[in-house]
């Protein structure tokens, strides 16, 4: 509680108490107040494309089955048997007509309804099956193929929760009317870090690239020089949701555009779904990196597999920072491609992604190491005794060169140049409000 109070008073001055990255009480409160209430990303629709397809995913620390039933409807079901609470689904993904509990054999259909149990008449004859199905999440919704769910019936509809962020998701996920699909199964790997370090980094921590990822330039894997890459926009799209674009000043500028997708491919996109303004941003963009509160991050950028294959290809990775305790996350990482890409283009994008943003990738290995030490600082006795505060002042009035853009065509608040940490302050402002919010209450948080 005192950490939250410190965050509340310190944040307007760019100060964040390190303890929120390690304190176990804060973490327990997050599971209820943040993961128990917000819309959480679970899966891409292409992972459960056919009737009977399912994947097992998490909301907070809890397992949910994301399934497509026999009639094609999506369900998000708490993976706990109604008889004794046993975990029903024992595979990560698959296609099935039913889920059968391993303990006594209660059997549920893919829409969650209880269809039977062994020796039904003797054991349960007369019991109401309809009242004993798997329990669904409070709300399930999709946006451009992205499946979200929330455990809070009072949560605003997904579209409203995303707010201005949907405009920016459009210009990546709606850039081609044909849509996207996952390239392979998601990678998963455990890192001893706090989930907020990932969300914070992907909200727009571009500043670290020149130092932490220096080697990536040295091997030539990323085609935009560091200083040039810092030119672009930081956007607080909606309360909690932030993103960052590296962008050429105009479309005729040399260098990669359309997030690095090959020119021929970019020209073939059916962009009828998005507006002229959105299209212009997509055309000029080299990097899109953003975070949907709380833990769903998105990154699109030009990459080469190993530095020797020019020109680079665009890659899209989406990921979740899955909490596993105050000091641990499981990173889930999916690569996406536009459906209209050729198998060869998809393969290149996948391999470029693996070489950079994956468990063995050049960027990923760089990033996770410092986050581990953020968590260590956060749970340290020294940080508590010394009242240790982290500095998030970049881009505040009088600090650095960034300025607010007056005539920004999109929703939210935009700053020019990526030397700016308002995107992260936006994350923590909303975080604080959610941690404080009473049941049924949805905070109204201003952008900065
Ligand atoms: Fe599932 Fe008994 S616990 S059938
Ligand atoms: Fe990084």
Image (spheres, rainbow, N blue to C red):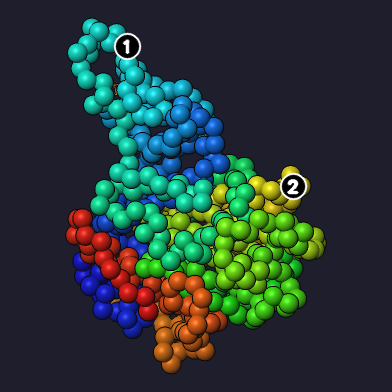
Find numbered disc 2 in the image and state the secondary structure of the residue it sits on.
loop
Foreground mark, 2 or 1?
A: 2
Relative to 33, is 436 above or below?
below
Q: Is there any visible trace of residue 17 in the rendered image?
A: no
For the question of whether residue 270 can be seen, the reply is yes
Place of residue 65 in the rendered image (x, y in percent of width and height, measured from the top left): 41, 36
The quadrant where residue 238 appears: bottom left
Mark 2 neighbour density, 10 Å: few (under 14) some (14–19) many (20 or more): few
Residue 375, image quadrant = bottom left
Residue at 45 percent across and 48 percent down: it is 142
Residue behind mark 1: 118
Quarter of the figure with residue 373: bottom left
Residue drawn at x 19%, y 55% as measured from the top left = 439
Asked if residue 269 lies left or right of residue 274, the reply is right
- Report the quarter where the C terminus lies: bottom left
Residue where numbered disc 2 is placed? 342
Report crowding for label 1: few under 14, some 14 to 19, many 20 or more residues within 10 A (C-alpha).
Answer: few
Q: Is residue 389 left or right of residue 248?
A: left
269 and 298: which is toward the camera: 269
Give the camera-side residue of 340 and 297: 340
Residue in the picture at 32% in, 65% down: 431
Which of marks 1 and 2 precedes in the sequence?
1
């Amino acid at each position: 509680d005192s950490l939250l109070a410190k965050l509340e008073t310190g944040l307007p001055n760019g100060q964040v108490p390190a303890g929120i990255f390690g304190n176990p009480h804060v973490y327990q409160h997050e599971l209820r107040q943040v993961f128990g209430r917000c819309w959480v990303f679970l899966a891409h629709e292409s992972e459960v494309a056919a009737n009977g397809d399912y994947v097992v995913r998490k909301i907070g620390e809890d397992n949910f089955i994301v399934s497509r039933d026999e009639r094609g409807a999506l369900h998000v079901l708490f993976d706990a048997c109604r008889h004794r609470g046993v975990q029903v689904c024992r595979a990560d993904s698959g296609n099935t007509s039913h889920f059968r509990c391993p303990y006594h054999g209660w059997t549920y259909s893919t829409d969650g309804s209880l269809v039977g149990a062994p020796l039904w008449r003797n054991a349960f004859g007369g019991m109401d099956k309809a009242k004993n199905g798997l329990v669904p999440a409070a709300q399930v919704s999709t946006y451009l193929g992205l499946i979200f769910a929330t455990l809070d019936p009072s949560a605003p509809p997904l579209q409203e929760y995303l707010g201005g962020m949907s405009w920016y998701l459009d210009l990546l996920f709606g850039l081609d009317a044909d849509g996207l699909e996952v390239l392979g199964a998601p990678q998963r790997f455990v890192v001893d870090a706090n989930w907020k370090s990932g969300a914070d980094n992907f909200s727009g921590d571009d500043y670290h690239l020149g130092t932490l990822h220096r080697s990536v330039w040295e091997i030539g894997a990323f085609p935009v020089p560091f200083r040039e890459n810092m030119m672009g926009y930081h956007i607080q799209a909606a309360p909690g949701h932030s993103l960052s674009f590296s962008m050429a000043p105009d479309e005729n500028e040399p260098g990669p555009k359309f997030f690095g997708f090959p020119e021929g491919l970019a020209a073939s996109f059916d962009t009828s779904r998005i507006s002229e303004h959105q299209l212009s941003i997509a055309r000029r963009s080299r990097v899109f990196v953003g975070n949907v509160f709380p833990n769903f991050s998105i990154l699109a950028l030009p990459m080469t597999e190993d530095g020797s294959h020019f020109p680079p290809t665009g890659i899209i990775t989406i990921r979740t920072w899955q909490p596993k305790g105050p000091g641990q996350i499981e990173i889930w990482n999916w690569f996406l491609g536009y459906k209209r890409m050729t198998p060869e283009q998809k393969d290149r994008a996948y391999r470029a992604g693996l070489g950079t943003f994956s468990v063995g990738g050049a960027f990923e290995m760089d990033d996770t190491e410092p986050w581990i030490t953020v968590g260590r600082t956060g749970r340290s006795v020294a940080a508590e005794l010394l009242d240790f505060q982290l500095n998030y002042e970049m881009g505040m009035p009088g600090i650095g060169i960034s300025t607010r853009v007056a005539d920004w065509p999109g929703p939210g608040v935009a700053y020019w140049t990526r030397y700016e940490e308002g995107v992260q302050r936006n994350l923590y402002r909303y975080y604080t409000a959610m941690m404080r919010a009473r049941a049924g209450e949805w905070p109204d948080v201003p952008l900065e």
